[in-house]
Amino acid sequence: MELFDAVAATGKRVIVSLVNGRPLAMPRLQVKAAAILETWNAGVQGGQGIADVLFGDVDPAGRLTASFPIAVGQIPLHYNHFNTGRPTLGEYVDGPRVPLYPFGFGLTYTTFEYGKVRLSATKLRPGETLTATVRLKNIGTRAGTEVAQLYIRALPALAGPRPVRELKGFQKVRLEPGGSRDLTFTISGTELGFFDAGGAWRNTPGQFQVWVSSDAVSGGEPAVFELGGE
């Protein structure tokens, strides 16, 4: 970090290429670096792949499979946590509660815009399916690849609390500048169920929220549907 601070102090634009095996707490890098490329442990061909991305020969299309904390005091930090009941003001007494980079996050060399999620039905019975559709558009000036992620939350039900969001699907899509595409996800009991304390697979009635977004914290207002009983 001392070397990074010294290089950044020269006023030159600094690109950081991370080679690591786990999430890092790096708020200073996030503030001072012009860009950060996460390469994990890329192996013997990592150098070639990193060069391809930095020189723009390919667009970075990977997304984080773990949340990156702002400080180590936030750990454990995971996207599919239970609702703690704390006020949702974005801050704890001694620091923020949000991650530096959330699960699913990642940038590319263009910008994508998500439309509103459209559900094929607002009520569902066990054994049935519905679809969630969203319009994805490349509003940037370069072609790029986006990973559209389907998240679902089961609101409080008789079975007890469920995670605030759960990843239930994704689609990797490449679009030219100005291009758009409707992405459709099928939702069934597989996406809505869970294993209870006894190890049995269950689907319980109640309301469900649906997002299709670029990471685990974005997506705006969710679409809502209800799962009925037998």
Image (cartoon, grey):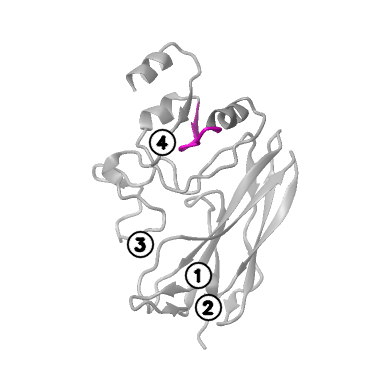
Residue type marked 3: Phe
In the image, which is nearer the foreground, mark 4 or mark 1?
Answer: 4
Q: Name the residue that disc number 1 marks.
A: 208
Extreme front residue here?
A: 44
Write the start and end of the magenta stretch as one range: 35-45
Q: Nearer the viewer, residue 127 or 48?
A: 48
- The circle drawn on residue 153 is none
Q: Name the residue that disc number 4 marks.
A: 20
- SS assignment at label 1: strand
Q: Name the residue that disc number 3 marks.
A: 82
Residue 139, by quadrant, is top right
User: What x and y, as percent, mark residue 20?
Assistant: 41, 36
In the image, which is nearer the foreground, mark 4 or mark 2?
Answer: 4
User: What x and y, as percent, mark residue 73?
Assistant: 26, 43
Whether tag 4 and tag 3 are in contact, CB under 8 A, the answer is: no
Q: Residue at x 44, y 79 (%)?
A: 202
Q: Residue at x 56, y 49 (%)?
A: 214
Find the distance from the CA under tag 4 to the CA under tag 2: 42 Å
Sequence order check, earlier mark of 4 and 2: 4
Q: Residues within 10 Å of mark 4 (few under 14, many from 20)?
A: few
In the image, which is nearer the foreground, mark 4 or mark 3?
Answer: 4
